[in-house]
């Protein structure tokens, strides 16, 4: 344990603390499980990210100094230290997607969402990110929607998919 | 006649990838059973006879690497499989994990038998986060192999011990680089280590480590069991077959297995069904984002180590991205520059700053304000990155830019005034 003497994290965020403890005990507290733990902790977050408190909890519970935890959390594309929308739209702009005119899909997404790539919608519903090639070039142009590959995109298909997301959110 | 073959991909769609029984019924683990009756040197000799080159991109002889492993004895070793597959345009390892996970595992066990230690060896399959949907399948395959005694303690009574796990990446292309892969597996940010020491001496958890690509391991059991079919394909200098991923402006993008020596033209027109538009082909990029750009007039080049070398190209990961005449070099540069700028780990100056400059340069080219002095600066910078970068990412990145400048000089120079 690497718990600072005067840490009140556990008292202040008991739920988060318990959740992280459970994830750490599933994977094990050794350093090589840090990335797996962070991915799991993030997946439990409603805003799809690693909050400062979550990083501190991981640090305390795994006994890894928080600077190291933060370094890892900020290094990888799949981990985010900033809140993200309920729907994470990651558009590939790799070579194969580029030759299949992903630019039209990007324009359609920006129009449909009303934000530029790199931003989030004010209602917190969507985050639209760039992502490097994720190996779905056979169905390019492609994006990941909350991690799932959606390929052979066209501007029409974008309209439909985003509409479905909005509907799903409304019906919740 | 079909121009594709199925040697490495023999089990695709015919063997249930979630069932070890089906794999065994199709001859699975026969190679391992045969291997444990042989001396490590004899197995290495089999690999050497087919001149098996690593399929992750660097084309380093597998036999040579395994021979090193034998010469660095240690009680515990690392056995790693690189399933990071981040090279844009590449998705052949995805299909190998998806359709033949037991083949990859069997190859790794043979690797551990040849180059592992006597105590519990750490075997890790590092699979990129983007392939999360495959993690479960591979974990299931590992579990079944454990239940049958192909993993764990005293495998097949040989005294070989292996503990195998799947490790997830978290989205970082540079983690495909061998030493960055180890850093990431150890739970750190994936920045490359300085070499030497090479990882066959000091690798995972500072143990001597054997690292190969998914496809490389998949080929091992095929060769050990009976290499005659594999060896019946290919050219004199490039024996056997290769998994390729074809994408871009083609009718039938996908993963195909071809004999070495198949020409680029045959791949594009006979295998991938030709172009998806009415436009003529402009260029293909071979081997991923850091692979060279090949203009249409060189389409009759055979895909083999020696054939591609003649035009200054490497087989690389086996990616073939096809672009028709609707694609400008500027858009392609834009895609490449952004990719590398995102993926540079920032450890060394030539790559970190070079990539920032490259992105700026592309912006300048787009604005129409770039001058010939900028062009000279671009060429200088690419040379610097190639020569002074710390790891393979920055060193190989200039290749497509330089090839484009060479083959499409007028077009590229047209972006500079
Ligand atoms: C930036 C960079 C990315 C790489 N990405 C991969 C990859 O995704 N998969 C892979 O197998 N090898 C990749 N490599 C090559 C590995 O460093 C290494 O050579 C390979 O995994 C060794 O296996 P092999 O000899 O069987 O090919 C990459 C190299 C560099 C420099
Ligand atoms: S070349 Fe340098 S900055 Fe670029 S990825 Fe390699 S180590 Fe990192
Ligand atoms: S280039 Fe977009 S998924 Fe590969």
Image: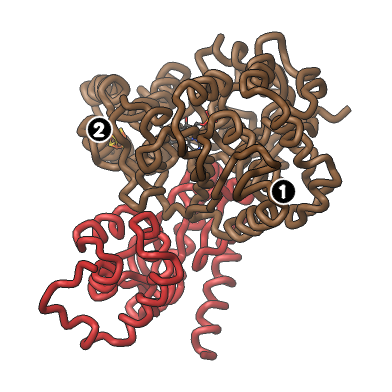
Decide: few, some or many residues near mark 1? Use Cα within 10 Å; few <14, some 14-19, many ≥20.
many
Quarter occupied by the N terminus of chain B: top right
Task: Tell which circle, 1 or 2, labels the residue nearer the N-terminal end.
Answer: 1
**Chain to which the residue tagged by mark 1 belongs:** B
Q: Tell me how far mark 1 sits from mark 2, CA to CA.
A: 40 Å
Observer-nearest of B261 and A29: A29
Observer-nearest of B234 and B178: B178
**Residue drawn at (43%, 16%), measured in percent from left and top?**
B406
Which hue belongs to chain B? brown
* Location of residue B179 (image quadrant): top left
**Chain to which the residue tagged by mark 2 belongs:** B
Element assignment for label 2: helix
Q: Are marks 1 and 2 on the same chain?
A: yes
Mark 1 and mark 2 residues within 8 Å of each other at the beta carbon: no
Which hue belongs to chain A? red
Residue corresponding to mark 1: B99
Residue corresponding to mark 2: B354
Residue B410 location in percent, x, y?
A: 41, 19
Quick check: B263 left or right of A108?
Answer: right
Quarter occupied by the C terminus of chain B: top left
Decide: few, some or many residues near mark 2? Use Cα within 10 Å; few <14, some 14-19, many ≥20.
many
**Residue drawn at (21%, 36%), measured in percent from left and top?**
B353
Element assignment for label 1: helix
Residue A98 location in percent, x, y?
A: 50, 44
């Amino acid at each position: 344990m690497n718990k600072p003497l005067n840490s009140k994290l556990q008292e202040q965020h008991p739920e988060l603390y318990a959740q992280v403890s459970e994830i750490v005990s599933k994977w094990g507290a050794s350093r090589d499980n840090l990335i797996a733990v962070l991915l799991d902790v993030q997946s439990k977050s409603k805003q799809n990210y690693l909050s400062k408190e979550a990083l501190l909890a991981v640090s305390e519970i795994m006994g890894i100094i928080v600077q190291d935890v933060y370094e890892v959390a900020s290094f990888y594309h799949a981990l985010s230290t900033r809140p993200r929308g309920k729907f994470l739209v990651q558009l590939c702009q790799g070579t194969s997607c580029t030759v299949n005119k992903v630019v039209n899909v990007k324009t359609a997404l920006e129009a449909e969402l009303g934000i530029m790539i790199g931003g989030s919608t004010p209602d917190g519903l969507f985050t639209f990110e760039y992502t490097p090639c994720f190996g779905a070039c056979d169905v390019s142009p492609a994006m990941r929607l909350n991690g799932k590959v959606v390929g052979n995109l066209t501007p029409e298909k974008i309209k439909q998919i985003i509409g479905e997301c909005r509907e799903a959110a409304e019906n919740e | 006649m079909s121009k594709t073959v199925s040697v490495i991909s023999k089990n695709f769609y015919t063997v249930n990838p979630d069932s070890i029984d089906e794999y065994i019924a199709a001859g699975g683990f026969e190679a391992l059973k045969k291997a444990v009756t042989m001396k490590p040197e004899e197995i290495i000799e089999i690999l050497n006879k087919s001149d098996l080159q690593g399929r992750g991109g660097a084309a380093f002889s597998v036999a040579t690497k395994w021979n090193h492993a034998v010469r660095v004895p240690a009680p515990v070793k690392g056995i790693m499989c690189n399933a990071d597959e981040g090279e844009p345009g590449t998705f052949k390892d995805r299909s190998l994990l998806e359709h033949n996970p037991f083949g990859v595992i069997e190859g790794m066990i043979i690797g551990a038998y040849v180059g592992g230690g006597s105590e519990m060896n750490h075997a890790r399959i590092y699979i990129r986060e983007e392939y999360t949907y495959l993690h479960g399948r591979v974990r299931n395959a590992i579990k079944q192999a454990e239940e049958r005694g192909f993993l764990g303690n005293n495998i097949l009574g040989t005294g070989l011990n292996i503990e195998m796990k799947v490790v997830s990446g978290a989205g970082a292309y540079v983690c495909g680089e061998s030493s960055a892969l180890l850093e990431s597996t150890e739970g750190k940010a994936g920045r490359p280590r300085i070499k030497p020491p090479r990882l066959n001496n000091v690798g995972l958890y500072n143990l001597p480590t054997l690292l190969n690509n998914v496809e490389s391991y998949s080929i091992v059991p095929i060769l050990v069991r009976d290499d005659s079919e594999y060896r019946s394909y290919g050219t004199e200098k490039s024996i056997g077959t290769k998994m390729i991923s074809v994408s871009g402006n083609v009718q039938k993008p996908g993963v195909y297995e071809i004999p070495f020596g198949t020409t680029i033209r045959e791949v594009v027109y006979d295998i991938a069904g030709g172009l998806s538009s009415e436009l003529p082909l402009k260029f293909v990029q071979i081997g991923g984002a850091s692979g060279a750009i090949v203009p249409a007039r060189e389409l009759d080049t055979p895909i083999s180590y020696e054939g591609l070398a003649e035009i200054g190209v490497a087989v690389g990961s086996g990616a073939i991205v096809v672009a028709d005449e609707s694609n400008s070099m500027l858009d392609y540069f834009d895609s490449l520059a952004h990719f590398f700028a995102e993926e540079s780990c920032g450890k060394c100056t030539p790559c970190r700053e070079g990539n920032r400059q490259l992105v700026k340069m592309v912006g300048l080219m787009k604005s129409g304000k770039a001058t010939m002095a900028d062009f000279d600066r671009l060429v200088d910078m690419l040379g610097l990155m190639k020569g002074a970068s710390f790891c393979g990412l920055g060193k190989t990145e200039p290749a497509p830019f330089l090839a484009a400048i060479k083959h499409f000089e007028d077009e590229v120079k047209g972006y500079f005034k």
